[in-house]
Image (cartoon, helix red, strand yellow):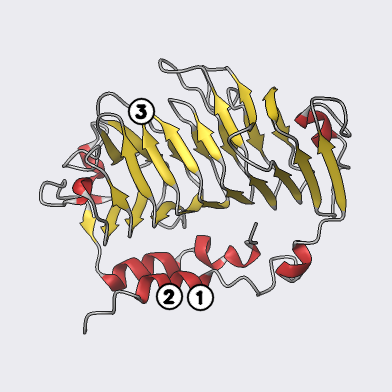
Amino acid sequence: MAAQSSSYIPLIIIVAFCWFISNSNGRLLSEKLTWKRLITVDQSGEGNFITVQDAIDSVPSNNVDVTLILIKPGMYKEKVTVPEDKPFIILTGRNAENTTITWDDSGDIYTSPTLSVFASDFTARYLTIQNTYGAGAKAVALRVSSERAEFYACRITSYQDTLLDEGGSHFYSNCYIQGGTDFICGNAASLFQKCHIHSISDGNGAITAQRRMKPEEDTGFYFTDCRVTGIKSCTLGRPWGPYSRVVFVNSYMSNVVNPYGWDDWGKPSTHSSVYYGEHKCYGPGATRSKRVEWSQSLTNQEAATIFTKTTMISAKSWIIKP
């Protein structure tokens, strides 16, 4: 087969993410952009609530109206949960640099998160979500167990297990994600587009720990047009699940990425089952001459197939622009 043009992959992604088709509930995206309820959170007391959780709690159960919760600048020290029965919430600040939801907890990936999202059709924009515990234990900043969720221009920071991308179909755009060990983990089907991935590991900590358990699962982490930087050295991923799937496309990798690229977590049996791919990545850390032989340098067609055959991509008709 003749080689495909270099513009093929971006074209596939643009078509697959067309903004103007109907979402899973049959509504046009332009309709979804129109919120019906506005709630303001302001620590000064001039809004509807002074805490983020109180604002979420005020949304009725089995919500059907898009609800915009506007968070005024400030440091909100609280653990926040968006329960499953409160879909269609947009949680937004105006600038992630001055609007932060923060907590300091550790020990368990399911109870330590600063923000836990269980509701479907959730959106977060222009927020910092952090867990300040530091190194030494599991300390999740953001847990996403939503069927559908979107994050735009958010800063998500911790050290170990920063983002528990647990399950569902998720989209991260222009986000900054920082950690040291397995800091993007879980078994969701997620696209990371134009995100900055920053490792603070001081010794080959893994960026991803994707947990795909069966070959028929349409899950995986897909990074396109991203940047990978760090302070010392890291690997791109290691297998939490035996069929772990992670792909980097058109992404910049600084020299922080270890030349061998990927880690098997001491499980050589996974060499034949994991799917770790790279395509048209660039920068000093993208050189594949010393990559582990069980990772893949994808062709144009292989990369396009990965993006188009998964449920993760076909479900993206519900994505909206911020």
Residue 59 visible here: yes
Residue contact between numbered discs 3 and 1, judged by CB atoms under 8 Å: no
Which residue is drawn at the image coordinates 16% and 51% (left, top)?
Answer: 287
Which residue is drawn at the image coordinates 30% and 68% (left, top)?
Answer: 302
Instruction: Establish if 7 lies above or below 257.
Output: below
Which residue is drawn at the image coordinates 63% and 41% (left, top)?
Answer: 95
Residue sitting nearer the eye, 191 or 320: 320
- Which residue lies under the disc numbered 1? 15
Residue 232 in the figure: left or right of residue 129: left
Quarter of the N terminus within the rendering: bottom left
- Which residue lies under the disc numbered 2? 11
Q: Earlier in the sequence, mark 3 or mark 2?
A: 2
Instruction: Establish if 44 lies above or below 252.
Output: above
Question: Can you tell which of label 3 and label 1 is closer to the viewer?
Answer: 3
Q: Which mark is residue 314?
A: none
- Which residue lies under the disc numbered 3? 200
Disc 2 packing (10 Å; few <14; some 14–19; many ≥20)? few
Residue sitting nearer the eye, 206 or 33: 33
Residue contact between numbered discs 1 and 2, judged by CB atoms under 8 Å: yes
Q: Secondary structure at mark 2?
A: helix
- Amino acid type at circle 3 is Ile
Residue 29 in the figure: left or right of residue 242: right
